[in-house]
Amino acid sequence: MKQTKQNSSTAVPIMDAEAIRRALQRIAHEIIERNPQLEKVVLAGIPTRGVEIARRIAGFIHQIEKIDLDTGVIDVAMHRDDVGTRRELPVVRASKLPVPLEGRTVIIVDDVLYTGRTVRAAMDAVNSFGRPARIQFATLIDRGHRELPIRADYVGKNLPTSMNEKVQVHIGGAGQPDSVGLIKPKTSE
Amino acid sequence: MRAAESVTTSSSPDAAFALRWNRKDLLGLRELSAEEINFILDTADAFKQVGTREIKKVPALRGKTLVNFFIEPSTRTRTSFELAAFRLSADVINISASTSSLTKGETLKDTARNLEALHADILVLRHSFAGAPQFLAQRLEASVINAGDGAHEHPTQALLDLYTIREKRGKIAGLHVAIIGDILFSRVARSNIFGLLKLGARVTLVGPSTLVPREFEKLGVEVSYKIDNVLPSADVVNLLRIQHERQRKEYFPGIGEYTRFFGLTKERAKFLKPDCLIMHPGPINRGVEIDSGIADGLQSVILDQVTNGLAVRMAVLYLCGGIST
């Protein structure tokens, strides 16, 4: 449940492009440190921003270790638990993972960790491809308010929020600098 | 809950929700926009991938009930819808003409309302009367999917044909598609014509003049009675089955005659472009509308159509059945 409606005029800046770069570089180091068998790691991004973040982390790992990790796309729309309860349907996109996953470590990558429902759906989706040795989770922002017993293994930034605020992530957009912002609820409401 | 304006194009690639679809029913391709058709095909891409997974099942329609209501006999379409529903975790009931109360004198509407009283969410209807799905769609809360109505439309067949062409050729606009055979009685032909024209293909209908009236030219297609003039420029040939069961004798003299003038024989296939796709909605009559060897040849995508039909039907069930009305 990403809260990222276009409303940049009222967003409070949280991270700029340089802060995002450093955070993802640190996550790359942490992944290397935590996974001695680095070549077994698969980075699986959740569309659309998670895919871009996974691509960048893979780039940093290549710079540091000269290893090209397998990357993939894990679409969660068809694994969500709220289909049929909302007026609009999530757009489904094709997932792509290297198979077989047996013996591998899949690191799911997303931009914002919030309720944890997206991550749960992503874990279900990964399991339908096979049985990886372990699943880890990396996120650029952890904004709290979990509704499921889920935590991130790699966090770019912990950002305490209230539930009526929105986190806005721009990454890899053409002609737009990377940024993370916090949108406060309008005072008139 | 009818959708008047069903397309609001979203320019943002980040849009996580489908603003491009809010129809509860799929009745035909005539009323769909090119954007809606493309959106179904894009969605089918995602579902096709599910078929390659170790576990070929997703929970997208968990808890939903689908009724396959087939007043006319059909094995492949019903099976395809049934499997599509299974892969989306929906529960499926099959009702055919012989097992329904229609034979006991119940009206179509009463039968459908009874199904709805059982909280069926999606009704897949095959009926011999054109317009039957529309009749029910207007009266039921449930989603109604047209699985073929009389000689009117068979939208999921046309969508899987479009999907197969797009998959194999990378595009549809600008291609020359020849639809050959019994056009007059064919709902497959009608749905294909609407879809192909909306996506920018050039369409030529070929067959005996009794089965391909010039009237069709009003839809924006070309009509030809000489298959040999059409084959060399075709990028796709879609061969329709000669429907023995519907044909009365007066439409053409005989099966042998049909094959001689309009069948895709080995000799005729030599005039096709090397990359021309050969399609057939099935079931094929080997040796009648298509030579047996050609049907199994390298240019034939007949079995790809079957595989793609599953993905397209998953997409349609997901889009129509997944929204909350």
Image: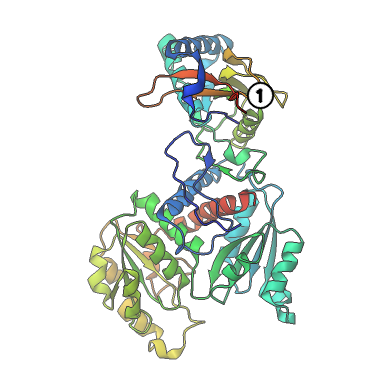
Residue, x 34% and y 81% (percent of image)?
A: B208
Q: In which quarter of the image is the N terminus of chain B?
A: bottom right
Let me know if residue B79 appears in the view.
yes
At which x and y percent is residue B89?
A: 67, 48
Give left or right: position of A112 versus B185.
right
Picture quarter containing residue A30? Answer: top right
Picture quarter containing residue A33? Answer: top right
In the foreground, B261 or B11: B11
Residue, x 41% and y 24% (percent of image)?
A: A172
In the foreground, A117 or A2: A2
Give left or right: position of B216 versus B242.
left
Above or below, A84 against A7 in this view is below
- How is the structure coloured here? rainbow
Q: What residue type is labelled 1?
A: Met
At which x and y percent is residue B320?
A: 58, 54
Which residue is at the far bottom? B250
Chain letter, disc 1 residue:
A
Residue, x 54% and y 35% (percent of image)?
A: A75
- Considering the numbered disc 1 on the image, is that residue within a helix, a strand or a loop? loop
Give left or right: position of B203 versus A38.
left
Residue, x 50% and y 40% (percent of image)?
A: A94
**Number of numbered discs on residues:** 1
At which x and y percent is residue B271?
A: 24, 66
Local crowd at mark 1 within 10 Å, few (<14), some, or many (≥20)? few
Which residue is at the far right? B118
Q: Name the residue under label 1.
A: A163
